Image (tube, rainbow, N blue to C red):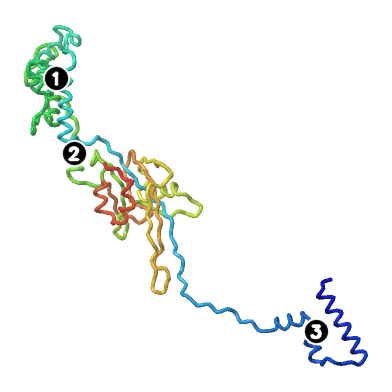
Amino acid sequence: MAASSRGSNAAAALLRSKLSEGQSSICASCRSAQFRSYSSAAEASAQAPVEPPKYNEFPQTPPAEYRIKSGIILTRAPLLTRALTPFENAFFFYQKRLNERLVLPFKHTLFFKKDTAGDLDWRIKFAERGNITAKELGRYYARGRNAWNDELLVGSTLSDEGRLREILLKDAESRVTEDGEEAKADEIVPVERPMDRITNADKTNDVKRLDRKLDRTLYLIVKDSNGVWQFPAVDVPTDGNLHEAAAHALESAAGVNMNTWMVGRVPVAHMVRKPEFNEDNTFKRRGEKVFFLKGRIMAGQADLEDNKLGLIDFNWLTKEELKEKLSEKYFHSVRNMMADR
């Protein structure tokens, strides 16, 4: 037992003994106040009314809500290498002339049997070139006294692609008839010319065809009922994932008449559109977080007939053309994933 408890018990026993003997040196109020139990104090404090704390009231702003969407950036890869610059044409032309100076002399007897149609064809063309082996290098004698002068002058057209193409096409024509004799001018059969780099779609600026801008990457964009151009995109379901939603967006927007494949399952770009609120802090428009995945088209064409997204038009555009169609913020969000060509 604690010391305080023993002392209080002793004092209480002493007072009781004095009261029993008739000695009342302590008034009744002091006795009741001095020996009041702790339980009575706790009961009194429990019965006292407790006022709740007061807090300043602030306007509650509803939390921002976003819709998660998955979009696809469908691309058509370049089909041709880019056109060479005039400097590059001149450099490669110089390399060909330099090669003529360094290699051994060409012995046509190792390739054509004497007095055959092939030998006769070679000798005719060799004479037309001024006894020069190379076909497209002009009047350049690699072992003559002016062999050192193998560089082109500024403004020279010897390295022009059109000129080289015409020379090689003419050299491919056979100058010998089936009888093994030299062919006349009207007996020479022209060879098939290669297709031009500039297609009919380029000439008419048909932005819905895939056979345009063959040396550039094309991107598919669609136009909704509000006149806004964008990449195909749909909402991602709660139990879905991004790459499946992107494939569904392409099928819902452009149909199934395309042979495509997803490059990966990781987004290559994203865009965030913040929510809009009314004056009373209610939602005017929910925000969006759009994640874009990359795809490739190998065959087919987009078809918006009976599409499920309410789209009305589509285009195949280059990076520079997209900048004019898409909004500034939209283009800024996806521009870094686009190739330079």
Task: Name which residue lies at 87% across and 79% down.
Answer: 10
Name the residue that disc number 2 marks: 198
Residue 339 appears in which quarter of the rendering? top left
Between label 3 and label 2, give the one nearer the viewer: 3
Of callouts 3 and 2, the N-terminal one: 3
In the picture shown, does residue 200 fall above or below 329? Answer: above
* Mark 3 and mark 1 residues within 8 Å of each other at the beta carbon: no
The residue lying toward the viewer, choosing from 161 and 220, is: 161
Q: Are marks 3 and 2 in contact (CB under 8 Å)?
A: no
The structure residue drawn at horizontal position 30% and vertical position 46%, both measured from the top left corner, is 219
Spot occupied by residue 118 in the image (x, y as percentages of width and height): 16, 12
In this rendering, the label closer to the viewer, 1 or 2: 1
* Image disc number at residue 134: 1
For the residues labelled 3 and 1, the Cα–Cα distance comes to 128 Å
In the foreground, 8 or 242: 8
Mark 2, other Cα within 10 Å: few <14 / some 14–19 / many ≥20: few
User: Which residue corresponds to the image point at 38% horizontal and 57% vertical from the top-left?
Assistant: 272
Quick check: 5 left or right of 69?
A: right
**Quarter residue 128 falls in:** top left
Please state, as top left, top right, bottom left or bottom right, where the C terminus lies in the image.
top left
> Regarding mark 1 in the picture, which secondary structure is present there?
loop
| Precedes in sequence: disc 3 or disc 1 | 3
Q: Which residue is the site of mark 3?
A: 35
The reply to whether dot 1 and dot 2 touch (C-beta < 8 Å) is no
Residue 305 screen position, x and y as percent: 33, 51
